[in-house]
Image: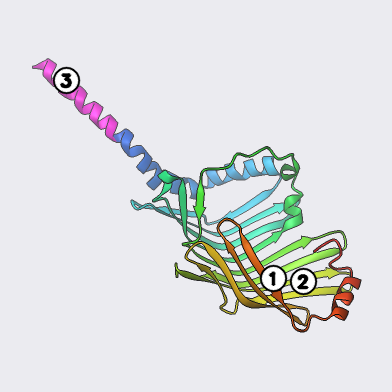
Amino acid sequence: TDRAKSIIKFITVTLVFLAVLASLPFVIYLKVLPYCVSNDKVLDYVKNIAQKAYYVDIDVKNPVLKTDLSPDLEFSVDKFVVKSNKKQILEVEDFELKLSLAEILKKNIIVKKAELDYFYADVNRIIDLPALKQPAKPQQKSDWNVNILQSVLKINKADIVYSVDKSTTLKLNARDIKTDDNISKKHVNYNVIADFIKGKNKLRITTSDNGKVYIKNKEKLVIDNTEILVNKYKISLNANVDAKSNFNTRLVSKNFSIPYVIELLDSQIVENNL
């Protein structure tokens, strides 16, 4: 009958509507989000917000978001530059990020991979941004957790500049920072040079992992007798830090002489800075 046909038609339309409604999250996840990330108009809108809110100019080259029917999400960008008053304060090159949303209902985001070729930051210019100088609002502790202990991390080159005070500058140069994919004993590799410069005086701290730094069983960072050079003097460091920030540290030096300590203090590099 016509009435039966009308009922069937109504039910069919309702089911189609519900199917479309149910598929919206997947359509947004699979199609809309990747489109927005790479869309020039959306990027221009974000740049405009950043300029008004933080008084910075942003340049983004080739951002890409990849999604599929798995819980994994991949994001990459060729270059990301932030400038304030036409001076560069932050730069990231060839950044790749892979996340797993498999435990998102537990408010846990797993970082599977985070790699970048180059990172630069001018710390003072960043913290001097007007928006960051406003009184901080009380923040409630978040229930969300970002898990990086299972991830593969890699930074080929990083340069960080920081003015400790009006006369002292720290230049941090890091190379070949990476973690492997061994979960039970994840090695952390790095080569770091930190230069404290004050007038004609210079304090250089150099350290490498030498295969003796690792994350044990996803819960404890272990530094097993690595070597730190302070100018020409050697210091051995043993330390461990757990997930709750409990730590033990032991420093040993055989040739860090008293005259050198006096010389270091006379240089005034460490005065009020370390």
Local crowd size for mark 3, using a 10 Å CA cut-off: few (<14), some (14–19), many (≥20): few
Q: Which residue is mark 2?
A: 195
What type is the residue that disc 1 sits on?
Asn
**Looking at this rendering, what residue extends furthest in the right direction?**
266
**Measuring 20% from the left and 25% from the top, which residue is drawn there?**
11
Local crowd size for mark 2, using a 10 Å CA cut-off: few (<14), some (14–19), many (≥20): some
| Pointers 3 and 1 in contact (C-beta within 8 Å) | no
Q: What element does badge 3 sit on?
A: helix
**Measuring 27% from the left and 35% from the top, which residue is drawn there?**
19
Q: Which residue is mark 1?
A: 173
258 on left or right of 125: right
Mark 2 or mark 3, earlier in chain? 3
**Residue 7's mark?**
3
Give the CA separation, mark 2 to mark 3.
79 Å
Quarter residue 51 falls in: top right
**Measuring 71% from the left and 56% from the top, which residue is drawn there?**
89
Q: Quadrant of the C terminus?
A: bottom right
